[in-house]
Image (spheres, rainbow, N blue to C red):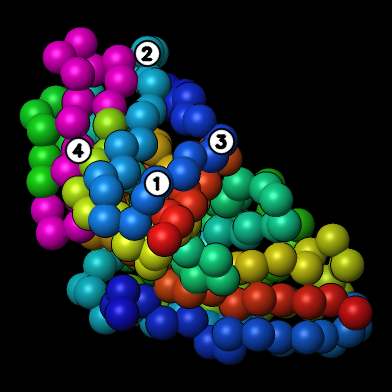
Amino acid sequence: DAKTTQPPSMDCAEGRAANLPCNHSTISGNEYVYWYRQIHSQGPQYIIHGLKNNETNEMASLIITEDRKSSTLILPHATLRDTAVYYCIVSNQGGKLIFGQGTELSVKP
Amino acid sequence: ETGVTQTPRHLVMGMTNKKSLKCEQHLGHNAMYWYKQSAKKPLELMFVYSLEERVENNSVPSRFSPECPNSSHLFLHLHTLQPEDSALYLCASSQAPHSNQPQHFGDGTRLSIL
């Protein structure tokens, strides 16, 4: 599976959009991009995934570049409850996820 | 509510005890997983079950013994654990291990070995 690179930490003001980047320059054609988050003392929560088209659901939007070498997770109106570690994972199987260190997002009032 | 329930949420045990962790999923999935998350470390995949058959065992010591009696239930039997086994143990499920559908996780069992 391709590796991903994420910034270790980010801050975001409450009510603003949080844009979390992920680089996956060695992604192969059949690999999806998955995003999860883990709030302290809870299990990872699935957010969204996509192959090459942009995706949106009730939680977030996923923007994948045309060359698929990077993506951005967008939380449109961040709240304090969005403070968590966010993981970007690329895999050709939803059942084979390799978690890295992720990005620790702090949403501040 | 993720549809994956783990019990107990917390467990403290001595090194000579035997205990079991339980996971139940209400999502109609056919694959279930055990992960270990130690402090300050990424999640480590331990076991994968597909239709009650173990399909992956990532070099996990034999003091951890999984059991999958049906596609909705998964157990992790523990015996003679070591202090370094203290961690958060997470269960997950998905439609099938080889599909692109995501896994859904429980909130884990926080295990402390005395």
What mark, if any, has residue B8 been given in the picture? none
Evaluate whether label 1 is on the same chain as label 3.
yes
Residue pointed to by mark 2: A25
Image quadrant in which you'd find residue B24: bottom left
Q: Does the magenta stretch include residue A69?
A: yes
Q: How far apart are marks 3 and 4 (CA)?
A: 19 Å
Name the residue that disc number 1 marks.
A12
**Residue in the image at 88% along x and 84% along y:** B14
* Image point (72%, 57%), residue name: B39
Label 1 SS: strand
* Residue B74 pos. (x, y %): 47, 76
Q: Which of marks 2 and 3 is nearer the N terminus?
A: 3
> Magenta part of the protein: which range?
A57-71
Give left or right: position of A71 versus B59.
left
Pick whichever of labels 3 and 4 is earlier in the sequence: 3
| Numbered badge on residue A62 | 4
The type of residue carrying mark 2 is: Ser
Measured from the top left, where is residue B98 in percent x and y?
29, 44
Identify the residue under disc 3.
Answer: A8
Sequence-wise, the earlier of marks 2 and 1 is 1
| Foreground label between 4 and 1 | 1
Distance from Cα at disc 4 to Cα at disc 1 = 18 Å
Which tag is nearer the camera, tag 3 or tag 4?
Answer: 3
